[in-house]
Image (cartoon, rainbow, N blue to C red):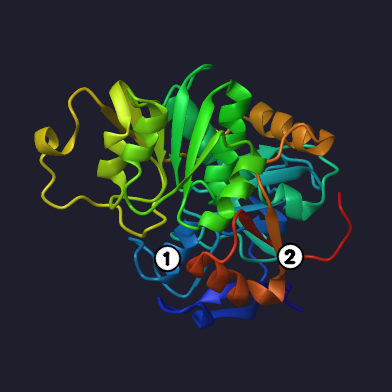
Amino acid sequence: MEETMRAVVLDGPGPADRLHLRVLPMPDPPPGWVRIAVRAFGLNRSELHTRLGLAQGVTFPRVLGIEAVGVVDHDPDSAWTVGQQVATMMGGMGRSYDGGYAEYTVVPRAQVIPFRSTLPWEVIGAVPETLQTAYGSLTTGLDLQRGHTLLIRGGTSALGLAATALAKDIGATVLATTRNAARTTALREHGVDHPLVDDGAVAEQVRELVPQGVDAALELVGTPTLPDTLAATRVHGTVCFTGMLSNQWTVKEFYPIGYLPRGVRLTAYAGEAGDLPADVLQRTLDRIASGELSLGPVHVYAFDDVTTAHQDLEEGRRAGKLVVRVRGDAAP
């Protein structure tokens, strides 16, 4: 009898109800690839972009999911031990081949990151892609240093909350925005020094607090707010364009001299599994387990409730990371 698994399949772009839980054949890893028994996966804006038809190079039907955590189930090359806890992300997952919205996923060995943790799977599932992006944005994208001032545009997103935690750990002063005034208290409780209510223009608020402008800014909303974020940044300061909460990521008729404030630097960040060192993942999980570090709230959904989770993601109903628990087994 052929082995099967359950997976969430998107037949084509459209609303969340285009996502269907189906029974599919068990994927068989070719040489150089590894099969992972998925325990949990985080939801990301990337998957929303794919569902809305905004992603390039995607063929349908497709199992979505650019990340997953679980255990090694089968490695034809025996390079990994069966049962090893691992995370995986990016590298074409959920776009050029089937991704993590499944009981099992098959990925190239190079994008498998090992770890050891006794945290619940839903907690672990909130970490990998968000940590990779926050870590890379603050280090590669911004070269953030102790004593710097940092503006995070989109502070209540999972990525914004993770970036706040890492920035405070570095020793930076953090300003972070939210469009919902009711969420400023939660930002402050998470460690944000100066929560700001974003009405589309916060540069004036920023310069009231930091007259010369911030040393660094992380743009997570997208191109609609990028000019204002640039205006909030000091001469020789840096803005890193990482997120697209607005679903807008291109600048029409871009004229650099007119668009960029004089002396303000603009960078961008997008990373892969190889950009998250295993020791950084391990150290972060250990510190979460000890209570030293929090990357923000986690909202957990059952595998059958992926449609609801996607609706919540699209409507911005939750602050923090949305995670789907695939299996009901106990924590590792």
Q: Residue at x 35, y 31 (%)?
A: 207
Amino acid marked by disc 2: Val
Position above or below: 178 against 20: above
140 displayed left or right of 263? right
Instruction: Name the residue at the right extreme.
Output: 330
Residue 311: quarter of image: bottom right
234 or 23: nearer the viewer: 234
Asked whether residue 169 is in view, the answer is yes
From the image, tell me which residue sits under label 2. Answer: 326
Residue 273: x percent and y percent? 54, 40
Considering only order in the chain, which callout, 2 or 1, is on the residue closer to the N terminus?
1
Q: Secondary structure at mark 2?
A: loop
Number of numbered tags placed on the structure image: 2
Quadrant where the N terminus is found in the figure: bottom right
From the image, tell me which residue sits under label 1. Answer: 50
Asked whether residue 33 is in view, the answer is no
Residue 197: x percent and y percent? 45, 50
Q: Secondary structure at mark 1?
A: helix
10 Å neighbourhood of mark 2: few (<14), some, or many (≥20)? many
Instruction: Name the residue at the front extreme.
Output: 208
Give me the disc on residue 101.
none
